[in-house]
Amino acid sequence: MALKQCLSGCFTEAIDFRKTLGVYNLCHWFNGLQAYMFLDSNAVAVVDISGCFKVYAENCDVDYMKKLRWVLGVDENLDEFFAIARRDRILKGFADEFKGWRPRASDLWWALLVAHCQKAASFRQGWGFLHRIVKSYGKEVVVEDKKILRPPNPEEVLQDPEKLVNSGVGFRAEGILKTAEAIVSKDLDFEKLSKMLDSDIEKQLLQLPHVGSYVARLAMVLALRRYSLPPVDKWVTALVSKVYGVEQRERAAEAYLKSRWDRWAGLAVYAMTITLDAQPLSIALRRVERGVITPRMDVEPSPLNMGSFCRE
DNA sequence: GAACTAATTTATCCGGGGTG
DNA sequence: CACCCCGGATAAATTAGTTC
């Protein structure tokens, strides 16, 4: 189906759109110059690295400007986060290079899908799942005469769970399907969650089968811009333990992150994965030792460079 | 061509969130 | 604490290269 143009314009805020659009974005949706962002199943924003945008949708009654600002984090003030980052052993380089970066918010469903795929998996493995899911469902919209793949919505996944399993997600399939059901039934609702406290959001998400604190908190970072509860996996535990000399236990790492980063702990974890190219632990540790703490363009795939999934 | 090391390919094992 | 699954890390094997 073809969409009609609803909005266009350019942002004038001091935002690094190249980084904002490029981080953790699959090759279908970012080509180095412009990004396609799904504001909902039938609305796409095309944003380029200079900050100019057009929004295409089926009907233009929705306030897509508000959605676009939310997705791009235009109104989020990260001064406090960057101030702490500048003094941090792992993130000081990130603080310099990523001035003006904002995390893109994804919708709740995609965020949970990402989190499910990332659990008990390496970065490469997890994003491989996601890439195959998007390709295998093959849903597309037409924007500016181009066909753009879009991620399947939960209804589509429930209609055809076979494709999910065939994407190689293995035992994660069950959790993903339960999550899809919860979203379709509105048991889980973005608007409701966004009015709640961080700790209550986590509790709510933990009700879902196969969602533990890691998945819940990662989804909160990705979809809700809630950062006070950091998602702590083995990678983060070991990294925090080695770099800051904290006891190598999940609880200790979490307590340390909270005390150091306060309400930005979740964003700090997210930034660590970016700046160390989400590399396996041993390599990440070596890089911190050697002070190689900004993204390297020769690492592929990496959060900043996910093109290789399209060439698989 | 034997003796050895270096480089590259192949085989094996294990780690990791969440559940119950 | 076993289980799910696959890529990572490491061990093992093969090939390539060097010297006498």
Image (tube, coloured by chain):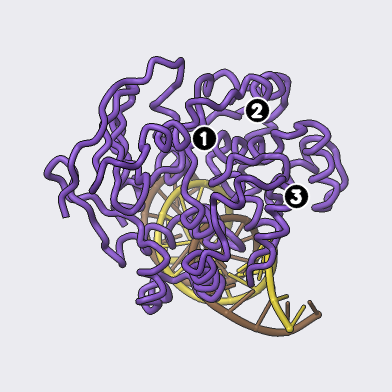
Chain colours: A purple, B yellow, C brown
In three-dimensional space, the C-alpha distance between marks 3 and 2, rounded to whole angstroms, equals 26 Å
Task: Provide the secondary structure element on which disc 3 rests.
Answer: helix
Label 2 or label 1, whichever comes before in sequence order: 2
What residue did someone put label 3 on? A199
Q: First in sequence: mark 1 or mark 3?
A: 1
Q: Which residue is mark 2?
A: A91
Q: CA distance from mark 2 to mark 1?
A: 15 Å
Q: Is residue B8 left or right of residue A276?
A: left
Q: Nearer the viewer, mark 2 or mark 1?
A: 1
Does residue A270 lie above or below B3 as drawn? above
Q: Position of residue B16 (x, y in %)?
A: 67, 61
Q: Are marks 1 and 3 in contact (CB under 8 Å)?
A: no
Does dot 2 land on a helix, a strand or a loop?
A: loop
* Mark 3 nearby-residue class (10 Å; few <14, some 14–19, many ≥20): few
- Residue A233 at x, y = what percent? 69, 53
Q: Position of residue A293 (x, y in %)?
A: 60, 29
Q: Residue furthest front?
A: A61
Q: Is there CB contact under 8 Å for labels 2 and 1?
A: no
Q: Which residue is mark 1?
A: A103
Instruction: Say what amino acid the circle numbered 3 marks.
Output: Ser
Q: Quadrant of residue A287?
A: top right
Rendered position, A37 above or below A203: above
Q: Chain letter of disc 2?
A: A
Most foreground residue, A25 or A37: A37
**Subunit of label 3:** A
Looking at the rendering, which quadrant does residue A246 occupy?
A: top right
